[in-house]
Image (spheres, helix red, strand yellow):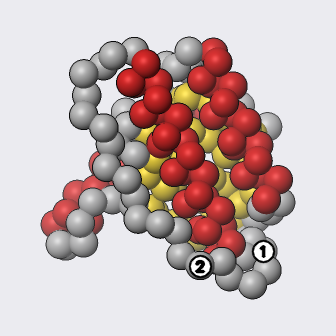
Amino acid sequence: MSTVPPEAEAEILAELRRLRARVPQLTGALAASADGFVLAQDSAAAEAESVAALTAAALGVAQRLSDSTGQGAFRELLVRGEDGYVATYAAGMAAVLTLTAEPRVNVGRLHLEARRSSLRIAELIDHILGRRGSGLPPLPPLPPAPPALPA
């Protein structure tokens, strides 16, 4: 269930597809609201809703951990499993980008490209909120992505 208008969902989905084209080792890409609702997904997996809900739960723990250790606001979370990676990136304050990747992914490239996409998704979400006249203040920008690593 998407919580954004169809045209916005299409724009977010297009960004997810561009990201997967730039990082071929990605096996899935999901944009979700910070409270666990799917905004758009580009994955063959049918469990997008459960991944979005688990992402929201992990986000809550990651935010608390980051705050309690004095590291500032949450930016990203990386989990490495035997069969690959799950990475979650803040997309402004209202959304997150969650990616799954093969174990052979270049993690530096994953971070670089995902940070760029999360900024774009944050811009799209901000535009949606602004167009709806939400009355919310603009979301603070994330720091710029680090310089590109050699492929």
The alpha-carbon separation of the residues under discs 2 and 1 comes to: 21 Å
Secondary element type, mark 1: loop
Q: Nearer the viewer, residue 130 or 33?
A: 130
* Callout 2–callout 1 Cβ contact below 8 Å: no
**Tag 1: Cα neighbours inside 10 Å, few (<14), some, or many (≥20)?**
few
What residue appears at the point 66 percent right and 30 percent down from the top-left corner?
A: 11
Instruction: Please indicate whether residue 9 sits to the left or right of residue 28 in the image.
Output: left
Q: In the picture, residue 134 is in which quadrant?
A: top left
Can residue 51 be seen by looking at this rendering?
Answer: no
Q: In the picture, residue 75 is in which quadrant?
A: bottom left
Q: Nearer the viewer, residue 10 or 71?
A: 10
What residue appears at the point 55 percent right and 28 percent down from the top-left corner?
A: 39
What quarter of the picture does the C terminus occupy? Answer: bottom right
Instruction: Please indicate whether residue 40 sits to the left or right of residue 63 in the image.
Output: right
Q: Nearer the viewer, residue 24 or 81?
A: 24
- Say which amino acid is labelled 1: Arg
Residue 147, label in figure: 2
Q: Which residue is mark 1?
A: 104
Closer to the chain start, of discs 2 and 1, is 1
